[in-house]
Amino acid sequence: MIPITLTELAASSGGRLVCRAGEERTCITSVTTDSRTACPGALFGAIKGERVDGHDYIGKAAASGASAVLAEKEPQDADIPYILVPSTIKALQAIAADVLKKAGIPVVAVTGSVGKTSTKEMVAAVLSQKYNILKTKGNHNNSLGLPLTIFELENEHQMAVLEHGISRFGEMSVLAGITHPDVCVFTNVGDCHLEDLGSREGVFRAKGEMFDFMPEDAKLVFYGDDAILGAQESVRGIRPLFYGLSDRNDVWAENVRSRGLAGSSFTLHIPGGTAEVNVPAPGIHQVVNALAAAAAGSLFGLSTDEIVQGVASYVPVAGRFNLVDTGRFCLIDDCYNANPASMKASLHTLSYAEGRKVAVLGDMGELGTDEEALHGSVGAAAAGEEIDVLLCAGPLSRFIFEEAKAADPAIEAFHFDTKEELIRALPGILKENDTILVKASHFCGFDEVVNAIKEFK
């Protein structure tokens, strides 16, 4: 973190600093909301959550060496400088916005319904060939995670690639109000968070709140093969740079060749040139992610060689189609999140595997009134991809199971009411050298399934 004094923090947050004379010049070099990671130089943000109140841990943070506290009420169990604010989270957002503004570096925002994290990683991999990049860690893309990412900004960083994730109207305004992105990479508009957003058009409106916070000279990078994004001739007078698999896009792929689970190759067309690209991750969706990264790279003046090298350096993050060799199985850990589009894409990629292919699927959340039909569509897709074994767990995944059996009565498919029942059944179903995809929405906790498979001897 770029050091910032308590006086500056109080000014950025609009809070009231309470400290002894001279302590106002104390420099803060990190921010945490976890008392266990507090250390000298740290500002501890005390957040009141649904189950835990961070104010109860101010004493522990102080004992661990925290230099100051950002809180909504006066500390009762610690003699430590503090900044009093009405809302700790809003204060952290305001501080982060100020930090980013003072840094004066370009911000690339990545949003969309599917593939945000993988696209963010691919974009960062490409841009890092020319710039020192700060990027969102994992999925820290919400109203708290985004500020915490920004606090990791150092003087040597030349650009920030920040993921923006939302599920309700108004949330993107908060995030984009912090970042004021110079480039917006929009991956797609899909069937996510329909409970609150109502429709795909609602999804676009909610995520499109970002456009109101972009500077006049901002750039847009849109997935042109998406029906909604591809129809946007301009946004706020800005013509998007379109990427996709078809040649009607500005950045597009030709001659896509699958290398199985090792990845894909394709001929990249970008304004001003072509190049042969190797994507070190399987699936056509990763080719699309590489195109998004190429488009972003072209906006920032990267050469075709730098773009090719950047894509080749891409490394998947845990829980996002991460291939794991357990010694007995090829395990595809894709269990962080799921929606119908990403489920179908992962099933299609699984079909590239050699030998027996096993899909372990759980429920998908926030799909609204069509959730049963949308789960069923995944079952039909599984049958169409000729998956050898389909294992479903959870009340909604029953519709995946039933539709798969209806589409292909011969498919070897099982449904379990709970994740625990599924885990107990795995030893009797899995066979050595299986390729196993594990995917479900985050709330299902299917990382436990992944860990159980890893432990098989």
Image: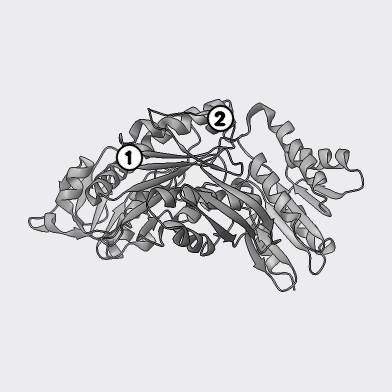
Mark 2, other Cα within 10 Å: few <14 / some 14–19 / many ≥20: some
Q: Is residue 450 left or right of residue 290?
A: right
Which quarter of the figure has residue 109?
top left
Q: Amino acid at mark 1?
A: His
Q: How is the image coloured?
A: one colour
The residue wearing badge 1 is: 180
Graded by Cα atoms within 10 Å as few (under 14), some (14 to 19) or many (20 or more), the crowding at tag 1 reads many
Query: Residue at (22%, 48%) from the top-left corner?
Result: 102
Determine the secondary structure under disc 2.
Answer: loop
Disc 2 target residue: 228
Q: Is residue 224 visible?
A: yes
> Depth check: 289 or 425 in front?
289
Q: Residue at x 82, y 45 (%)?
A: 383
Disc 2 to disc 1, how far (Cα)? Answer: 23 Å
Residue 172's mark?
Answer: none
Front residue of 188 and 34: 188
Q: Position of residue 73 (x, y in %)?
A: 26, 43
x and y percent of residue 80 in the render?
21, 56
Name which residue type carries label 2.
Answer: Ile
Which residue appears farthest toward the right when viewing the image? Answer: 410
Where is the N terminus found, in terms of image quarters? bottom left
Q: Which residue is outermost to the left? A: 21
Asked whether, in this view, residue 183 is left or right of residue 427, the answer is: left
Vertical placement of residue 62 versus 54, above or below: below
| Residue 409 position in % (x across, y down) | 91, 43
Q: Are marks 2 and 1 in contact (CB under 8 Å)?
A: no
- Which part of the image, by quadrant, shows the C terminus? bottom right
- Using the rendered image of the protein, determine whether residue 32 is visible from the camera's viewpoint: no
First of labels 2, 1 by sequence position: 1
